[in-house]
Image (tube, rainbow, N blue to C red):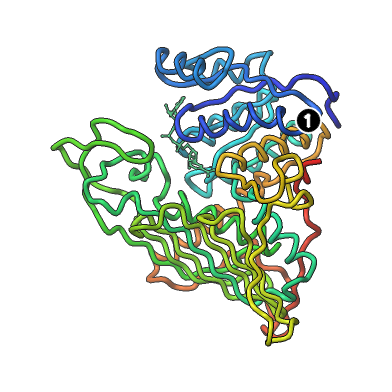
Amino acid sequence: MSEAAGRPLRVAMVGHAFMGRAHSQGWRGAPRIFDLPREPVMQVLVGRSPERSAEAARHLGWAEAETDWRRVVERDDVDLVDICTPGDTHAEIATAALAAGKHVLVEKPMANTLAEAELMAGAAADAAARGVLSMVGFTYRRVPAVALARELVAEGRIGEVRQVRCQYLQDWLADESTPLSWRTDKAKAGSGALGDIGAHIVDLAHFITGQRVAGVSGRLDTLVTERPVAESFAGLSGKGGSERGPVTVDDVAMFTGELAGGAPAVFEATRFAWGRKNALRIEVNGSAGSLAFDFEDMNVLNYYDAREPARTGGFRRIVVTEPDHPYVGSWWPPGHGLGYEHGFVHQVVDLVRAVAAGEQPTPSFDDGLAVQRVLDAVERSHRNRSTYTEVAEHRRPADASAAPAERTHDVPAPAGPSRGE
Ligand SMILES: NC(=O)c1ccc[n+]([C@@H]2O[C@H](COP(=O)([O-])OP(=O)(O)OC[C@H]3O[C@@H](n4cnc5c(N)ncnc54)[C@H](O)[C@@H]3O)[C@@H](O)[C@H]2O)c1
């Protein structure tokens, strides 16, 4: 069932700090740069304090402010709820919004536990049957170079996927005086580096290769077990006082595993890598070439074609700013690069187009559940001395008995990111 094109899409956003600001850029910028079938209306912003919410609404461009998300999800003048709060609130807000008939965009990781993620995926399936759609905010899928990497894999440009290595390296917790926050509290965040940034690289491995992680051996470490209690916050960091408290999440998550088609994969997520600010890196080695991406050079995709003569072969540095690259056609002339916030614009574009067409946007809550299954398997493996732990739901029946040499590469047709016409 498609919704009438042209009708405004009235949005309520919950949370107005880091992601709230980034999503506001997306809602504001998307209709100014791209042609959208429905005009997003920034209807109401929800926070916890009346004063700060009102100030954020004014600053970020929302028509009104509210302090109770329960009231907002029931409002007749809201079509879509955008959830930009910590993970402990995602399941409750998302399921309430879907039950009230609102489309939902929820930040990653979709939930704090596998049980919550299963509940949410079930609620999303029920809602989809009523034409109510849902999506998870794995924004890095919308970086043009990442979307291009997926296309090249699907086109067979690196042949069969043989090996995948993924890292997400940051350093904002390496300083021991960085205070406690919701991100260091298991009750609020579910996990540490694993769910915060490890979730992104699991999703990107799924997205780029078209195959899910089917088993892992994991190790989680907490390097600094106690930190100052925060007196104030700015961004990810803040100022601590003299009182101290425990860190209840992992600081570093490392796991090896394999994709459903048998390719071995290695993952590392840490917020302790001094000097690495947002080094989200993924490299895929295939039977006929390689692809490599690093978010710290986000307009570039490196491509190695092993079929080229060795004499002149080498990694090709593709500057992903050409009009026929994913999303880029609506932006600037070639070479005039994009930045972090543009992923949030593209996220809105893809979501609004899917809602207007009545089609399931991606990543769906099923995709979010798939990531959560992998995170859960890493935690179980860690608790069991890093024992290899299957993600049984991701194992393709044909792969279970196949020897590695017989495993085939099977990438579903790409969902086709917006080309930015
Ligand atoms: N897609 C990405 O790349 C990306 C990047 C950073 C964070 N995230 C995710 O976004 C979510 C939010 O993270 P953040 O960095 O914006 O956190 P943040 O601490 O900067 O902001 C959280 C916001 O939620 C609000 N909030 C908390 N509980 C609330 C409630 N019950 N009702 C209304 N508002 C409430 C806070 O007041 C604050 O405005 C998390 O799930 C996080 O993992 C995603």
Q: Is residue 65 above or below residue 316?
A: above
Q: Give the residue number, with chain letter if any, for mark 1.
A: 36
Residue 68 in sight here: yes
Q: Amino acid at mark 1?
A: Leu
**Residue 30 rendering spot, x and y as whole percentages:** 69, 32
Q: Nearer the viewer, residue 31 or 400?
A: 31
**Residue 138 rendering spot, x and y as whole percentages:** 59, 46
Q: Quadrant of the C terminus?
A: top right
Q: Nearer the viewer, residue 9 or 172?
A: 172
Q: Quadrant of the N terminus?
A: top right
Q: Is residue 352 above or below residue 399?
A: above
Residue 118 in sight here: no
Residue at horizontal 15%, vertical 37%? 243
Q: Is residue 62 left or right of residue 67?
A: right
Residue at horizontal 40%, vertical 13%? 51
The image quadrant of residue 201 is bottom right
**Residue 140 rendering spot, x and y as whole percentages:** 59, 49
Residue at horizontal 56%, vertical 71%? 265
Q: Is residue 57 above or below residue 89?
A: above
